[in-house]
Image (cartoon, rainbow, N blue to C red):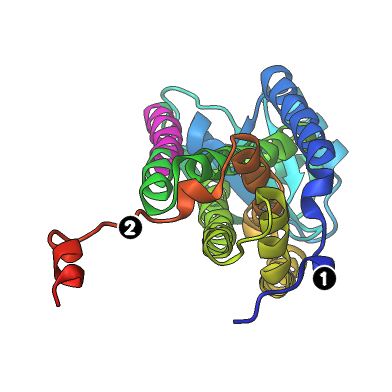
Amino acid sequence: MQLLKLKETVEFMRYRKFAMMFSIVLMLASLASLFVNKLNFGLDFTGGTLIEVGFEQAADLKQIRQIMDSNGYKDAIVQLYGSSKDVVIRLAQREGVKAEMLGNQILSILKEGTGQELIMRRIEFVGASVGDELTEQGGLAMLTALICILVYVAFRFEWRFALGSVFALFHDVLLTLGLFSVLGLEFDLTVLAAILAVIGYSLNDTIVVSDRIRENFRKVRDSGPEDIINISLTQTLSRTFITSITTLLVLAALFFQGGALIHGFATALLLGVFVGTYSSVYVASSIALALGISKEDLIPEVIEKEGADQETMMP
Protein backbone atom coordinates (compact mmCIF):
# COMPACT_ATOMS: atom_id res chain seq x y z
CA MET A 1 0.00 0.00 0.00
CA GLN A 2 1.35 3.42 -0.94
CA LEU A 3 1.90 5.59 2.10
CA LEU A 4 0.21 8.98 2.29
CA LYS A 5 2.53 11.92 2.07
CA LEU A 6 2.96 14.01 5.18
CA LYS A 7 1.29 17.08 3.64
CA GLU A 8 -1.87 15.00 3.07
CA THR A 9 -2.22 13.89 6.66
CA VAL A 10 -4.54 15.24 9.34
CA GLU A 11 -2.59 16.72 12.24
CA PHE A 12 -4.41 14.81 14.99
CA MET A 13 -1.56 14.97 17.48
CA ARG A 14 -1.43 18.76 17.29
CA TYR A 15 -4.54 18.82 19.49
CA ARG A 16 -3.58 15.94 21.78
CA LYS A 17 -2.97 18.14 24.85
CA PHE A 18 -6.37 19.79 24.54
CA ALA A 19 -8.00 16.39 23.97
CA MET A 20 -6.30 14.87 27.01
CA MET A 21 -7.33 17.82 29.21
CA PHE A 22 -10.90 17.45 27.92
CA SER A 23 -10.86 13.72 28.71
CA ILE A 24 -9.43 14.27 32.19
CA VAL A 25 -12.15 16.83 32.99
CA LEU A 26 -14.87 14.41 31.84
CA MET A 27 -13.34 11.56 33.84
CA LEU A 28 -13.15 13.67 37.01
CA ALA A 29 -16.75 14.76 36.52
CA SER A 30 -17.79 11.12 36.09
CA LEU A 31 -15.93 10.08 39.24
CA ALA A 32 -17.54 12.92 41.19
CA SER A 33 -21.01 11.92 40.00
CA LEU A 34 -20.38 8.26 40.83
CA PHE A 35 -19.21 9.27 44.31
CA VAL A 36 -22.12 11.66 44.98
CA ASN A 37 -25.05 10.25 43.01
CA LYS A 38 -23.81 6.67 42.68
CA LEU A 39 -25.43 4.34 40.16
CA ASN A 40 -29.15 3.68 40.03
CA PHE A 41 -28.84 -0.10 40.29
CA GLY A 42 -31.76 -2.10 38.98
CA LEU A 43 -33.38 -5.04 40.72
CA ASP A 44 -30.78 -7.35 39.15
CA PHE A 45 -28.28 -5.91 41.63
CA THR A 46 -30.28 -4.58 44.59
CA GLY A 47 -32.91 -7.28 44.93
CA GLY A 48 -36.66 -6.64 45.17
CA THR A 49 -39.84 -6.99 43.14
CA LEU A 50 -40.73 -5.57 39.74
CA ILE A 51 -44.39 -5.43 38.74
CA GLU A 52 -45.54 -4.41 35.25
CA VAL A 53 -49.19 -3.35 34.98
CA GLY A 54 -51.25 -2.52 31.89
CA PHE A 55 -53.94 0.20 32.15
CA GLU A 56 -57.05 0.75 30.02
CA GLN A 57 -56.27 4.44 29.61
CA ALA A 58 -53.17 6.59 29.86
CA ALA A 59 -51.75 6.17 33.35
CA ASP A 60 -51.45 9.14 35.72
CA LEU A 61 -48.10 8.56 37.42
CA LYS A 62 -48.75 11.22 40.06
CA GLN A 63 -52.01 9.57 41.05
CA ILE A 64 -50.41 6.11 41.14
CA ARG A 65 -47.59 7.37 43.38
CA GLN A 66 -50.15 8.91 45.76
CA ILE A 67 -52.09 5.63 45.86
CA MET A 68 -48.93 3.63 46.60
CA ASP A 69 -47.83 6.15 49.26
CA SER A 70 -51.18 6.16 51.04
CA ASN A 71 -51.18 2.34 51.21
CA GLY A 72 -47.78 2.03 52.87
CA TYR A 73 -45.57 1.64 49.78
CA LYS A 74 -43.61 4.88 50.11
CA ASP A 75 -40.47 3.32 48.59
CA ALA A 76 -42.25 2.41 45.34
CA ILE A 77 -40.62 3.64 42.12
CA VAL A 78 -43.29 4.21 39.45
CA GLN A 79 -42.34 4.69 35.79
CA LEU A 80 -43.90 4.42 32.36
CA TYR A 81 -42.68 1.44 30.39
CA GLY A 82 -42.78 1.75 26.61
CA SER A 83 -46.20 3.44 26.36
CA SER A 84 -48.50 5.71 28.38
CA LYS A 85 -50.65 2.70 29.35
CA ASP A 86 -47.87 0.45 30.66
CA VAL A 87 -46.44 1.13 34.11
CA VAL A 88 -43.56 -0.52 35.97
CA ILE A 89 -43.52 -0.45 39.78
CA ARG A 90 -40.31 -1.34 41.61
CA LEU A 91 -40.40 -2.25 45.26
CA ALA A 92 -37.58 -2.98 47.67
CA GLN A 93 -37.29 -6.49 49.04
CA ARG A 94 -39.87 -7.40 51.70
CA GLU A 95 -39.18 -10.32 53.98
CA GLY A 96 -41.88 -12.94 54.34
CA VAL A 97 -43.92 -11.69 51.39
CA LYS A 98 -44.04 -13.73 48.20
CA ALA A 99 -43.78 -11.91 44.89
CA GLU A 100 -47.11 -13.28 43.64
CA MET A 101 -48.95 -12.21 46.80
CA LEU A 102 -47.35 -8.77 46.64
CA GLY A 103 -48.34 -8.42 42.98
CA ASN A 104 -51.96 -9.25 43.75
CA GLN A 105 -52.00 -6.70 46.57
CA ILE A 106 -50.62 -3.96 44.31
CA LEU A 107 -53.07 -4.83 41.53
CA SER A 108 -56.01 -4.69 43.94
CA ILE A 109 -54.88 -1.35 45.39
CA LEU A 110 -54.46 0.22 41.95
CA LYS A 111 -57.83 -1.08 40.68
CA GLU A 112 -59.60 0.43 43.67
CA GLY A 113 -57.68 3.70 43.52
CA THR A 114 -57.91 4.36 39.76
CA GLY A 115 -61.22 2.69 38.97
CA GLN A 116 -59.72 1.06 35.88
CA GLU A 117 -59.45 -2.56 34.82
CA LEU A 118 -55.79 -3.54 35.00
CA ILE A 119 -53.74 -6.36 33.51
CA MET A 120 -50.83 -7.92 35.37
CA ARG A 121 -48.18 -8.32 32.65
CA ARG A 122 -45.29 -9.72 34.69
CA ILE A 123 -43.81 -10.06 38.18
CA GLU A 124 -40.08 -10.48 38.75
CA PHE A 125 -38.30 -11.09 42.04
CA VAL A 126 -34.55 -10.96 42.72
CA GLY A 127 -33.10 -11.84 46.11
CA ALA A 128 -30.53 -9.58 47.80
CA SER A 129 -27.88 -12.31 47.83
CA VAL A 130 -28.24 -12.76 44.07
CA GLY A 131 -27.92 -9.00 43.59
CA ASP A 132 -24.73 -8.82 45.68
CA GLU A 133 -23.24 -11.72 43.73
CA LEU A 134 -24.06 -10.07 40.40
CA THR A 135 -22.47 -6.80 41.53
CA GLU A 136 -19.27 -8.56 42.57
CA GLN A 137 -19.06 -10.81 39.52
CA GLY A 138 -19.84 -7.93 37.15
CA GLY A 139 -17.01 -5.83 38.56
CA LEU A 140 -14.62 -8.77 38.40
CA ALA A 141 -15.62 -9.41 34.78
CA MET A 142 -14.64 -5.86 33.75
CA LEU A 143 -11.40 -5.95 35.77
CA THR A 144 -10.42 -9.32 34.30
CA ALA A 145 -11.13 -8.07 30.77
CA LEU A 146 -8.86 -5.02 31.27
CA ILE A 147 -6.00 -7.12 32.72
CA CYS A 148 -6.18 -9.67 29.89
CA ILE A 149 -6.19 -6.86 27.33
CA LEU A 150 -3.13 -5.26 28.99
CA VAL A 151 -1.21 -8.53 28.77
CA TYR A 152 -2.28 -9.25 25.17
CA VAL A 153 -1.45 -5.81 23.77
CA ALA A 154 1.90 -5.71 25.61
CA PHE A 155 2.80 -9.08 24.08
CA ARG A 156 1.36 -8.29 20.63
CA PHE A 157 2.73 -4.77 20.23
CA GLU A 158 4.65 -2.91 22.94
CA TRP A 159 4.08 -1.99 26.59
CA ARG A 160 3.50 1.69 25.75
CA PHE A 161 0.65 0.71 23.45
CA ALA A 162 -0.66 -1.63 26.15
CA LEU A 163 -0.86 1.14 28.75
CA GLY A 164 -2.45 3.49 26.24
CA SER A 165 -5.04 0.89 25.21
CA VAL A 166 -6.03 -0.02 28.78
CA PHE A 167 -6.25 3.64 29.80
CA ALA A 168 -8.45 4.30 26.76
CA LEU A 169 -10.74 1.41 27.76
CA PHE A 170 -10.88 2.66 31.35
CA HIS A 171 -11.72 6.11 29.96
CA ASP A 172 -14.59 4.67 27.87
CA VAL A 173 -16.07 2.63 30.74
CA LEU A 174 -15.80 5.51 33.23
CA LEU A 175 -17.52 8.02 30.93
CA THR A 176 -20.32 5.54 30.20
CA LEU A 177 -20.87 4.89 33.91
CA GLY A 178 -20.71 8.63 34.53
CA LEU A 179 -23.51 9.26 32.04
CA PHE A 180 -25.75 6.72 33.79
CA SER A 181 -24.92 8.29 37.14
CA VAL A 182 -25.58 11.89 36.02
CA LEU A 183 -28.87 11.05 34.29
CA GLY A 184 -29.97 8.57 36.96
CA LEU A 185 -30.57 5.86 34.36
CA GLU A 186 -31.15 2.35 35.64
CA PHE A 187 -28.06 0.16 35.63
CA ASP A 188 -28.97 -3.51 35.12
CA LEU A 189 -27.47 -6.62 33.56
CA THR A 190 -28.20 -5.47 30.00
CA VAL A 191 -26.19 -2.29 30.63
CA LEU A 192 -23.33 -4.33 32.08
CA ALA A 193 -23.37 -6.48 28.93
CA ALA A 194 -23.29 -3.29 26.83
CA ILE A 195 -20.23 -2.00 28.71
CA LEU A 196 -18.38 -5.26 28.09
CA ALA A 197 -19.33 -4.94 24.40
CA VAL A 198 -17.96 -1.36 24.43
CA ILE A 199 -14.65 -2.70 25.75
CA GLY A 200 -14.46 -5.13 22.85
CA TYR A 201 -15.44 -2.52 20.26
CA SER A 202 -13.01 0.11 21.53
CA LEU A 203 -10.20 -2.44 21.73
CA ASN A 204 -10.77 -3.47 18.12
CA ASP A 205 -10.42 0.15 16.99
CA THR A 206 -7.29 0.61 19.10
CA ILE A 207 -5.68 -2.57 17.75
CA VAL A 208 -6.26 -1.46 14.14
CA VAL A 209 -4.67 1.93 14.82
CA SER A 210 -1.76 0.42 16.77
CA ASP A 211 -1.03 -2.08 14.02
CA ARG A 212 -0.88 0.67 11.39
CA ILE A 213 1.38 2.80 13.61
CA ARG A 214 3.76 -0.13 14.06
CA GLU A 215 3.76 -0.81 10.31
CA ASN A 216 4.54 2.82 9.48
CA PHE A 217 7.29 3.04 12.09
CA ARG A 218 9.04 0.32 10.11
CA LYS A 219 8.37 1.81 6.66
CA VAL A 220 8.66 5.57 7.09
CA ARG A 221 12.30 6.47 7.68
CA ASP A 222 12.35 10.28 7.47
CA SER A 223 9.59 11.24 9.93
CA GLY A 224 9.34 11.53 13.70
CA PRO A 225 6.95 9.61 15.98
CA GLU A 226 4.31 12.36 15.99
CA ASP A 227 4.25 12.57 12.19
CA ILE A 228 4.07 8.79 11.83
CA ILE A 229 1.14 8.59 14.25
CA ASN A 230 -0.64 11.32 12.25
CA ILE A 231 -0.04 9.38 9.03
CA SER A 232 -1.35 6.17 10.60
CA LEU A 233 -4.47 7.80 12.02
CA THR A 234 -5.20 9.42 8.66
CA GLN A 235 -4.84 6.11 6.84
CA THR A 236 -7.29 4.38 9.20
CA LEU A 237 -9.69 7.34 9.36
CA SER A 238 -11.99 6.15 6.55
CA ARG A 239 -12.24 2.67 8.07
CA THR A 240 -12.94 4.10 11.53
CA PHE A 241 -15.52 6.53 10.20
CA ILE A 242 -17.43 3.94 8.16
CA THR A 243 -17.42 1.36 10.97
CA SER A 244 -18.57 3.85 13.59
CA ILE A 245 -21.32 5.37 11.45
CA THR A 246 -22.83 2.02 10.46
CA THR A 247 -22.70 0.82 14.08
CA LEU A 248 -24.29 4.03 15.37
CA LEU A 249 -27.10 3.77 12.80
CA VAL A 250 -28.03 0.31 14.08
CA LEU A 251 -27.82 1.44 17.70
CA ALA A 252 -29.95 4.50 16.96
CA ALA A 253 -32.65 2.20 15.58
CA LEU A 254 -32.48 0.12 18.77
CA PHE A 255 -32.58 3.26 20.91
CA PHE A 256 -35.66 4.78 19.27
CA GLN A 257 -37.56 1.65 18.22
CA GLY A 258 -36.27 -1.13 20.45
CA GLY A 259 -38.57 -0.43 23.38
CA ALA A 260 -37.94 0.21 27.06
CA LEU A 261 -36.51 -3.25 27.71
CA ILE A 262 -33.28 -2.54 25.81
CA HIS A 263 -33.25 1.24 26.18
CA GLY A 264 -30.40 1.18 28.71
CA PHE A 265 -28.46 -1.30 26.58
CA ALA A 266 -28.75 0.92 23.49
CA THR A 267 -27.90 4.07 25.47
CA ALA A 268 -24.70 2.55 26.86
CA LEU A 269 -23.60 1.31 23.45
CA LEU A 270 -24.39 4.60 21.71
CA LEU A 271 -22.18 6.57 24.07
CA GLY A 272 -19.60 3.77 24.26
CA VAL A 273 -19.10 3.53 20.49
CA PHE A 274 -18.81 7.31 20.15
CA VAL A 275 -16.37 7.63 23.06
CA GLY A 276 -14.48 4.49 22.00
CA THR A 277 -13.83 5.93 18.53
CA TYR A 278 -12.58 9.16 20.07
CA SER A 279 -10.32 7.37 22.57
CA SER A 280 -8.75 5.18 19.88
CA VAL A 281 -7.69 8.29 17.98
CA TYR A 282 -6.61 10.54 20.84
CA VAL A 283 -6.29 8.77 24.19
CA ALA A 284 -4.42 5.57 23.28
CA SER A 285 -2.16 7.19 20.66
CA SER A 286 -1.46 10.27 22.79
CA ILE A 287 -0.40 8.18 25.77
CA ALA A 288 1.92 6.04 23.65
CA LEU A 289 3.49 9.20 22.23
CA ALA A 290 3.80 10.79 25.69
CA LEU A 291 5.56 7.65 26.99
CA GLY A 292 8.22 8.09 24.29
CA ILE A 293 7.38 5.49 21.67
CA SER A 294 10.08 5.40 19.00
CA LYS A 295 11.19 3.42 15.95
CA GLU A 296 13.71 1.48 18.01
CA ASP A 297 10.87 0.11 20.15
CA LEU A 298 8.96 -1.32 17.19
CA ILE A 299 11.61 -2.34 14.65
CA PRO A 300 12.45 -6.02 15.25
CA GLU A 301 16.03 -6.90 16.06
CA VAL A 302 18.04 -8.53 13.30
CA ILE A 303 19.43 -11.83 14.54
CA GLU A 304 22.54 -12.92 12.69
CA LYS A 305 22.85 -16.62 12.00
CA GLU A 306 25.87 -18.36 13.41
CA GLY A 307 28.56 -18.80 10.77
CA ALA A 308 27.01 -16.30 8.37
CA ASP A 309 30.16 -14.15 8.24
CA GLN A 310 32.37 -17.16 7.58
CA GLU A 311 30.16 -18.33 4.72
CA THR A 312 30.25 -14.92 2.99
CA MET A 313 34.07 -14.83 3.28
CA MET A 314 34.56 -18.23 1.65
CA PRO A 315 35.78 -18.10 -2.04
Front of the two marks 2 and 1 = 2
Q: Position of residue 2 (x, y in %)?
A: 64, 81
> Which residue does the image show at 75% across and 57% down from the upper left?
55
Three-letter amino acid code at disc 1? Glu
Q: Which residue is mark 1?
A: 8
Q: How many numbered callouts? A: 2
Looking at the image, is 95 positioned above or below residue 273? above
**Position of 216 compared to 296: left or right?**
right
Q: What's the magenta bit mostly, secondary-structure-wise? A: helix
Residue 64 vertical placement versus 155 (above, below): above
How many angstroms separate mark 2 from mark 1 (CA)? Answer: 32 Å
The residue indicated by pointer 2 is 302
Mark 2: amino acid: Val
Q: Secondary structure at mark 2?
A: loop
Kindly indicate the quadrant of the structure image that contains residue 169. Answer: top right
Is 42 left or right of 113, judged from the image as shown?
Answer: left
Q: Tell which of 28 and 8 is nearer to you.
A: 8
Q: Residue furthest top?
A: 36
Determine which of the numbered discs, if any, sits on residue 290 in the image: none
Is 105 positioned to the left or the right of 27 in the image? Answer: left
Local SS, label 1: helix
